[in-house]
Image: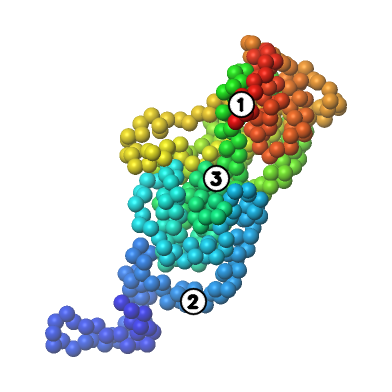
Amino acid sequence: MKADVYSGFLTNKVKVFSTKKGVSPLVLPKKLLQKVRPFMLASAMMVTFSCRNNAPLPQQENAALKATDKTELRAEWQSVYNEVVKTYHLTELCDKEPLDGAYIEALMKGKDVPVLTDSNYNHRIENVENFWEIVKNGIRTIKEVQMCPALTLEQKNEYELQAVKMLSQISRVKGTENEVDLRDYNNMKAFLYFEKVVQYRDDYSEVMEKKDGWIDERDEALGRYYQDYIKLDEKVSMYSGVEKFAKALYLNDDRFLISSQDSVQANALSRKMLADWLEAEEIKYKWLWYFENIEDDVFCNAINYWYKRGNTFGINLGIDMTGRMRKGNFSPVGTIIIHEMQHVMQVEPASREKAEDNHKSYEALGVQQGAYETGYLAELGPTLYSLALEDKIYKEIHGIEARKTVDYGTIDTGDGKVGLGEAAVWFSKMIDKYPTKSVDELLGQKEVIEQLNHWGNGTSRVLEKAFER
């Protein structure tokens, strides 16, 4: 049915034709048309338009899109591009560079789209060809979504702008057209986004809606320092005492230095620390966590990590609004958030599935669908950082000089031991001495890892091999 038929409803010139030959058409009376016009018009439009078969847009919406100033639209894309490149510091890369604006615009036109052969949702990037296959098919899906009458013009524009944001954070190897580092966290997150678009298409709630406490590939902090944690894990293999120390520290309830009686002051001081930390880390978004009561969620004060095949990749983060911890302990709410956000930045932004498993059936993966555990090493940096902050808070509340060591208890690995207060003052000095962004990169510094190894093993033996890599 064409658009000129719709205009017939407005001019009262609608005729009904019989399916039999020789029967004259019946002209519908004006009064009858006035009564049934809304129902007939709605029915006709419902039959005609469907977003799944790429039918043309309704006439009014199509006219609105044609009236859009394309120059302004491109300027909006350029603004998004500039902001992303600045936020991600992509011009400071050594061997890589951001895609240029012309390349991104060519991608958005979507003229060179490979056949989609990858139907496996939430998996690792297999190779560069697999990366671009998903990215380009995601862009084509976004172009198809522009034809969907179920979405508003604003929502359709969100799809496009988000695509430009994700493309703007992709970096390629310098001197190449489309060679990308598949271990780069920005590239991995772009892959996750376009894979999600291909999976959910015009399902706006799944693709675009943002809820407090849900952290996904659109958040810059996710996975930012995951490679620092991998490097630390490699170094620690040469230092047996580090893992011992990490476990002894994390399982020691004395590390919660603040009592519930000091909670009001401690929470206020910690919120200022949180604000300073977020500013230093250039994290501008405030919806990365939500507040709740610890009794309502077994995952409260911890990252709830969704990574399995078939699930949408992301992290859920709820924080107890008063700082209550398990076992009746207390930790200032600001330090809890910093601790958990450091875990968020440790997470590799990819499915736990291996690239070689991409074409296996879900059932064939078997045990790989079990819980993902990082062990105590992942807790070491965030826990030491929390210890140093809580030590400062305790001293400020009780009027104690920052340089003094407070007796909070002892970290005992069975082979070596150190006072919690001594470790807190020492790590605070290391934070000032090595102003690196990543707490795991800090732990990997030679004098830091050797000291932790000494406390864990009760020996000062120095190993050099880990630093020769």
The residue at which mark 1 appears reads as 466
The residues bearing labels 3 and 2 have C-alpha atoms spaced at a distance of 38 Å
User: Residue flagged by tag 1: what amino acid is it?
Assistant: Ala
The residue at which mark 2 appears reads as 66
Q: Please provide percent x and percent y for residue 58.
A: 41, 73
The residues bearing labels 3 and 1 have C-alpha atoms spaced at a distance of 23 Å
Single out the mark in the foreground, 3 or 2.
3
Counting residues from the N terminus, which is met first, the one under dot 3 or under dot 2? 2
The residue at which mark 3 appears reads as 184
Q: Please provide percent x and percent y for residue 35.
A: 35, 79
Q: Residue furthest left?
A: 21
Q: Secondary structure at mark 2?
A: helix
Characterize the local packing of mark 1: few (<14), some (14-19) or many (20 or more) Cα atoms within 10 angstroms: some
Q: Is residue 405 left or right of residue 334?
A: right
Counting residues from the N terminus, which is met first, the one under dot 3 or under dot 1? 3
User: Residue flagged by tag 2: what amino acid is it?
Assistant: Lys
Single out the mark in the foreground, 1 or 2.
1
Residue at the (61%, 20%) spot, across then down: 239
